[in-house]
Structure formats: C-alpha cells, structure tokens
Image (spheres, rainbow, N blue to C red):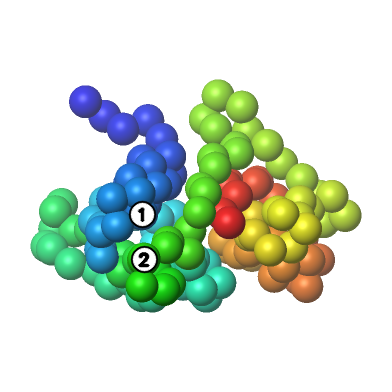
Amino acid sequence: MANTDPISDMLTRIRNACEKRHQTTNIPLSRMNRSIAKVLEQEGFIDQFSEAGEGVQKHLVLSLKYSGKQKVPTIRSVQRVSKPGLRIYTNRRDLPKVLGGLGVAIISTSKGVMSDRDARKEGVGGEVLCYVY
C-alpha cells in the first residue's frame, strides 16, 4: 500500500521510537525527510542522522536524544500541521511560535525547509509542516 503522507509517517516513527525509548529509528529516505531531519539536528532534538541501505531500500537512521538517568526524550511532542487534505500556509509576519519560542515549527519555504526562527531571519513564509517540542 502506498504511503500518502511520508512526513506524517516520519513523525509517527519518531514519536513511537521516543515513547519506547529506542536509541535509533529508521525512516524511508526522501529529500523532504532528510531536510526535516537536518532541522531537527540543528535545533538539538536529535543527536545525528545518517543514510543507510542501497537503492530503493535507502533509509535515514536517526539517533534520538534523551536526557537524565530516566532517559527523558528531548522530543516531547511532534504534531503534523499541514496535511495533504488541508495545507496550512503562513506569511513571514504570522509565523507561529511554538510554546512561546521553546518549541520549533518546521516550515517549508522557497529557500528550503527551515525552523520558524530561521524563516523569521530570512524574512520568508511558507507551508507549516509540523510543530516539535
């Protein structure tokens, strides 16, 4: 069965892996998934990511980040905003702040996928992909 929303699939895999306290999780490789993983790494939500596999079987391996002895995940919540059935766009003046700036909104802009902070610096708006905090 074809996956109609690969971004939601990625976010669900991350959410499930964090809930089960896994060290890594595998995500099918796409340019969008790679860009989102890059933003998550830059914002400090994951340790690192790498590509593995060959050909059609290529996937991203995300190394998840935890804090403390009880392994509290740094990603507490991941929420998909813009969906295939209802796209959510915002201009540069109305970019959302997640938890008053403690979280991150991942935005797909004409200059690439970036966090809401970077989009404000660049002065661009775009499609709000998800909230992470």
Instruction: Using the rendered image of the protein, determine whether residue 65 is visible from the camera's viewpoint.
Output: no
Indicate left or right for 39 with 52 as reference.
Answer: right
Instruction: Using the rendered image of the protein, determine whether residue 75 is visible from the camera's viewpoint.
Output: yes
State which quarter of the image contains the N terminus: top left
Which numbered tag is attached to residue 27? Answer: none
State which quarter of the image contains the C terminus: bottom right
| Image x and y of residue 53, in percent | 13, 63
Pick whichever of labels 2 and 1 is earlier in the sequence: 1
| Image x and y of residue 3, in percent | 31, 32
Indicate left or right for 53 with 105 as reference.
Answer: left
The crowd level at tag 1 (other Cα within 10 Å; few <14, some 14-19, many 20+) is: many
Q: Which residue is mark 2?
A: 70
Which numbered tag is attached to residue 18? Answer: 1
Residue beneath the point at 41% across and 73% down: 68
Quarter of image, res 92: bottom right
Indicate left or right for 129 with 12 as reference.
Answer: right
In the displayed structure, would residue 94 be above or below residue 110?
Answer: above
In the displayed structure, would residue 41 be above or below residue 93?
Answer: below
